[in-house]
Structures are given as structure tokens and as C-alpha cells.
Image (spheres, helix red, strand yellow):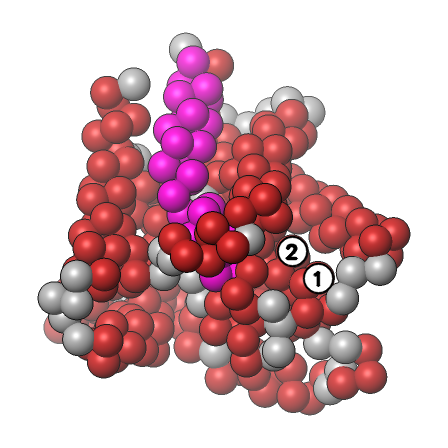
Amino acid sequence: MLQIINILFPAIALIGLGFYLFQSRTLEANFWNGAEKLNYYVLFPSLLFSSLATADMHIAHIDTILMVIFLVMALVICSVYCFAQIKKTAISQIGVYVQSLIRFNTYIGLSIATTMNNPEIKSILVNILAITIPFVNVVSILSLTPKHQLNIKHILISLIKNPLISSCLVGILFNVFNIPLWQGLSNLLSAFSNSSLMLGLLCVGTAIQFNTIKTYFKTSLIISLLRIVVIPCVAFICLQWFELDYSAVVAIMIFFSIPTASSAYILTKLLNGDYQLMAAVISLQTLLSVFSLALMLTLVQIYYT
């Protein structure tokens, strides 16, 4: 258990520090707006690009790993739409449910994988993220867009302009064609990458809003428990049907146990979704994920020892 605490502590401490600095107004609000933009457009894309450009793409059983990932995600998406059809749920809330259950906070995931000092786990997780980032962005936009407003051209342009997707695609191209990185550029990207996780986790802390949790507590709690408890358990059950090693299982469990992305709030507000509910879910999931991640990692360790 002490090992799990050591792994999770850096991420928890940075999120807590970000929450304190934001709530205490130690730094002005403009600082956090600029920090989020800097990380979204420069630092985090650099991390994704450099990780993918140098990652081992020849991971054993990567096809099986991705099969499990997309199988679980497809099951979740279908379940949401079936529930929405039965309950006659508004499109503004469907988008919240979908994003809450399939989007992921990459900063938390990579921070945990990096702290574990297991290059194989980090490599598998980076590959999973690179392939699923475009997918979850498309699904998220579609879930918030009424059928009569669907515009494929607009969606494609939005995806191309997304710096996270662009950096993933370019990083994969560099890796596939074995294009070498100049050492000076590599050192710069490394500096950007190191800054990205720290700044990203601080910004995650600023997204925690206790007032919205209080207003939407019951709904956000149900969604949060589904996301960080039920879905990881479903994923673990599915994994029993496949022969995957310890590193692959841990990477998959981290992927499904991390909370939804803070940026889901911005997209929800931009596309006229129920952004207040989204804020409550992001806040509660982030808080509860501290316990769920510890629980899931502990269970995996016990199972494989």
C-alpha cells in the first residue's frame, strides 16, 4: 500500500496545490487562463509528440490491448445512448454523460505512469492515448451536437486544428518513418514535457468546484462511481478473457481509472451542453479518483502476486 501512496502522491500534491493557489487568489485568474492555454497549445503537445516519436510502437499484443479498450468504450457509449433513449434525455446532458464516462485526464494518467518508473507501462499508455484521443474527441463533439446541426466538414476542421491530435499524428509519423530528432530540439521538447505534467496537474486543481458538487451531488456521484469504479471493474473482467502481461493490464487499468478531462467543461460550454453538471462531475471525479486509483492499482498488484 505504501508503494501505491508513493506513486499517487506527486499527482495528488500538485492537484491540491493548484486548488489552494486558485482558491486563495495567490495568483491572479489571468495567470491560470494563460497557463492552461500554454499547456494546451505548446507544452502538452510537445510531450505527446516527443513521447510518440521515440516510443516503442512494436508493443506485444498491442492489437489485443486496443481491442479491450475499444470494446469497453463501445459498451459504455451504447449503454449511455440506450439509457438516454429510455429516459428521453436532452442532448445537452447526453454529451455530459458520454464525456464523463469515456474522456480521460491525460495529465494524471501520464504522471502516474511516469512515477511508476516502468518504461513499458508508460509506452503502452502513451500508445493508448495517441489512438484514443482523436476517437474520444469525435465522439464528444457528436454527443453534444443535435442531428440537424451535424456538419462533418466542421468537425474535421476542428479535429485538424486540435493541437493534441496534430501532435499525436506528427509524432507517429516521425516514429514510423524513423525520422531522427536533432539533439537540441530533443532537449527543448524534454524541458517542455517535464513542465507540462506539473502545470497540467496544477490546472486540474483549479477545476475543482465544491459549490457545483453540492448542487448536482446525486447525479454527479452516480456518474463518477460509474466512471472510476464500475467501468474499471468491467475492463478488468474483460481482461480475464485475454492473455496480457502485467504491464499491459496496469496501463489499461490506469486508463480506465483516471477521471474525465478538465477540458470537457470548455467543450460542453462551447456546444451549449449542461456545463454546470459537467463542472460538478469533473470536480467530484477528480476528488474520488484519489481513492479509486489506489484501490484499482492495489487490486491489480494483489491479483498478480
Image point (71%, 76%), residue name: 145
Mark 1 lies on a secondary structure that is helix
Q: Distance between the residues labelled 1 and 2?
A: 5 Å
Question: Can the viewer see residue 248?
Answer: no
Question: Can the viewer see residue 26?
Answer: yes
> Which x, y percent locates residue 276?
52, 65
Q: Which amino acid does label 2 sit on?
A: Tyr
Region of the chain picked out in magenta, as a range: 278-302
Q: Nearer the viewer, residue 187 or 178?
A: 187
Question: What's the magenta bit mostly, secondary-structure-wise?
Answer: helix
Image point (21%, 30%), residue name: 6
> Which x, y percent locates residue 132?
56, 57
Image point (33%, 41%), residue name: 113
Q: Please report contact status of discs 1 and 2: CB closer than 8 Å, yes or no.
A: yes
Identify whether 220 is placed above or below 136.
above
Q: Sort mark 2 into few (<14), some (14-19) or many (20+) by Cα contacts within 10 Å.
A: many
Q: Residue furthest right?
A: 86
| Pointer 2 residue | 97
Residue 14's disc is none
| Pointer 1 residue | 94
